[in-house]
Image (cartoon, rainbow, N blue to C red):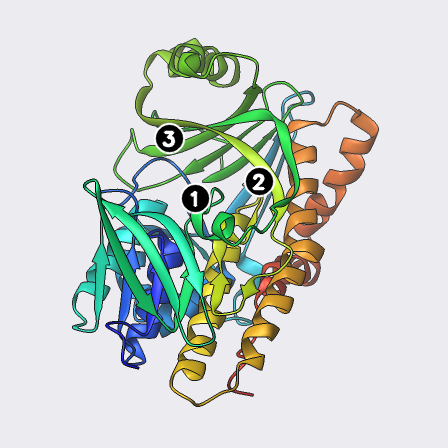
């Protein structure tokens, strides 16, 4: 039986769009179904680790992404309690990897770049404003039922990728649990403009404190009052609608009243944090990827990193299966290997990062945890070894040896 599309992708965030682009580039007909009416520009992920950039290059996105964002190497931990600043960076990777730098770019901006590339392909389309209401499957196809402007819509394809976020309608329709836990605190991600010529602040600074802990990251190079992401944590008991009023107090305690007074807010997004995973990332003809498969707190930037690595290996594997070049066993391997990468590596590291930056109430333990970063600043071999961790989150091609 012929279908209007060979693959349906649920979700038009970077993970969904990357899968759609990779599949369409292989010649498959792809339809993306997205609940929202347009790309989501709310403050979310902005960091792309050096290890993910090869994949963007393979898909033809690297040049556009680096032109829209900027490349950087520096990092620092700043300890509020002692005033110590520990500087280190990615310079140790130079001569060892192709892209020895990270990319800073808003997640929404990357999604729009991918979308532009996808729109150039005649075998891909995005259906905006389509809310998935049901999924069924048999041995040959998946049927997706959606609602658009109050009217039912039905789509069929041999394969479905659920990349529709932590609240995934696809995962829920499969009756898969989302195993793990939700952190009791609320994270707040704020895009702010403030003076960025202050000495002693790296373009990525982890502000270590058990009350005022924050991740402070430069987003663009737009001038002396550039755009920065300031991510901090607050008690989830506080009313969510009051985050804008509470933000100046945090800024003043970290940067002082003068900087706080000169700060303007571009966007703000409060959200809950999770350490969760589905028990499997494949159920028959349905695959899960990105936050639909696994969700982590963002400390260290492993959430979107895992979504990118999911996408790189999945679109290639599914494309090979759909075109008859590989057996379905590669999809089982995808599920097993990507879940292991999250459970055994990404989630534990993100948890450790969060505890260091936001929960360092024990000065002895904190000092011990920071010693590795002190050593990295003086030992390039050690730094390269530690920085290579993000590469271990990648799953090599399941199609090509």
Dot 3: what SS?
A: loop
Of the pair 171 and 134, the residue shown nearer to us: 134
Dot 1: what SS?
A: loop
Residue 291, relative to residue 223: is it above or below?
Answer: below
Disc on the earlier residue, 2 or 3: 3
Where residue 196 is drawn, which disc sits there? 3
Q: Residues within 10 Å of mark 3 (few under 14, many from 20)?
A: some
Residue at the spot 49% in from the left edge and 44% down from the top edge: 166
The answer to whether residue 249 is visible is yes
Q: CA distance from mark 1 to mark 3?
A: 20 Å
Q: Residues within 10 Å of mark 2 (few under 14, many from 20)?
A: many
Residue at the spot 56% in from the left edge and 50% down from the top edge: 175
Residue 67 location in percent, x, y?
26, 56
The residue to which callout 2 is attached is 299
Residue 75, relative to residue 60: is it above or below?
Answer: above
The residue to which callout 1 is attached is 45
Residue 330, relative to residue 216: is it above or below?
Answer: below
Of the pair 374 and 122, the residue shown nearer to us: 122
The answer to whether residue 377 is visible is no
Disc on the earlier residue, 1 or 3: 1
Q: Quadrant of the C terminus?
A: bottom right
Q: Residues within 10 Å of mark 1 (few under 14, many from 20)?
A: some
Q: Name which quarter of the figure residue 25 lies in.
A: bottom left
Q: CA distance from mark 2 to mark 3?
A: 22 Å
Residue at the spot 47% in from the left edge and 18% down from the top edge: 255
Position of residue 77 in the picture relative to residue 200 (left or right):
right
Q: Disc 1 or disc 3, which is closer to the eye?
A: 1
């Amino acid at each position: 039986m012929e279908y209007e599309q060979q693959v349906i992708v649920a979700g038009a965030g970077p993970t969904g769009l990357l899968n759609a682009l990779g599949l369409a580039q292989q010649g498959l007909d792809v339809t993306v179904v997205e609940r929202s009416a347009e790309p989501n520009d709310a403050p979310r992920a902005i960091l792309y680790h050096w290890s993910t950039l090869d994949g963007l290059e393979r898909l033809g996105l690297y040049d556009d992404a680096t032109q829209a964002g900027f490349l950087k190497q520096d990092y620092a931990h700043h300890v509020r309690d002692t005033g110590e600043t520990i500087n280190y960076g990615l310079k140790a990777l130079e001569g060892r990897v192709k892209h020895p730098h990270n990319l800073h770019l808003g997640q929404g901006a990357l999604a729009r770049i991918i979308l532009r590339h996808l729109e150039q392909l005649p075998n891909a389309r995005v259906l905006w404003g389509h809310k998935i209401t049901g999924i069924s499957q048999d041995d040959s196809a998946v049927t997706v039922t959606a609602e658009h402007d109050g009217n039912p819509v039905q789509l069929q394809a041999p394969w479905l990728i659920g990349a529709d976020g932590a609240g995934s309608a696809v995962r829920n329709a499969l009756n898969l649990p989302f195993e793990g836990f939700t952190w009791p605190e609320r994270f707040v991600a704020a895009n702010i403009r403030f003076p960025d010529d202050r000495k002693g602040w790296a373009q990525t600074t982890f502000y270590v404190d058990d009350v005022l802990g924050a991740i402070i990251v430069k987003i663009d190079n737009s001038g002396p009052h550039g755009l920065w992401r300031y991510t901090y944590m607050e008690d989830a008991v506080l009313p969510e609608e009051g985050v804008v009023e509470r933000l100046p107090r945090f800024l003043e305690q970290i940067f002082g009243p003068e900087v706080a007074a000169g700060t303007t807010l571009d966007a703000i997004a409060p959200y809950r944090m999770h350490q969760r995973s589905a028990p499997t990332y494949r159920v028959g003809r349905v695959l899960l990827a990105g936050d639909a498969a696994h969700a982590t707190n963002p400390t260290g930037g492993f959430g979107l990193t895992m979504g990118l690595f999911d996408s790189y290996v999945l679109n290639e594997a599914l494309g090979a299966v759909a075109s008859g070049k590989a057996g379905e066993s590669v999809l089982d391997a995808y599920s097993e290997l990507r879940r292991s990468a999250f459970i055994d590596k990404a989630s534990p590291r993100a948890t450790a990062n969060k505890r260091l930056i936001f929960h360092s109430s024990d000065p002895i333990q904190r000092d011990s945890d920071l010693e590795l970063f002190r050593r990295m600043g003086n030992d390039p071999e050690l730094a390269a070894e530690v920085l290579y961790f993000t590469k271990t989150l990648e799953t090599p091609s399941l199609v090509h040896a």
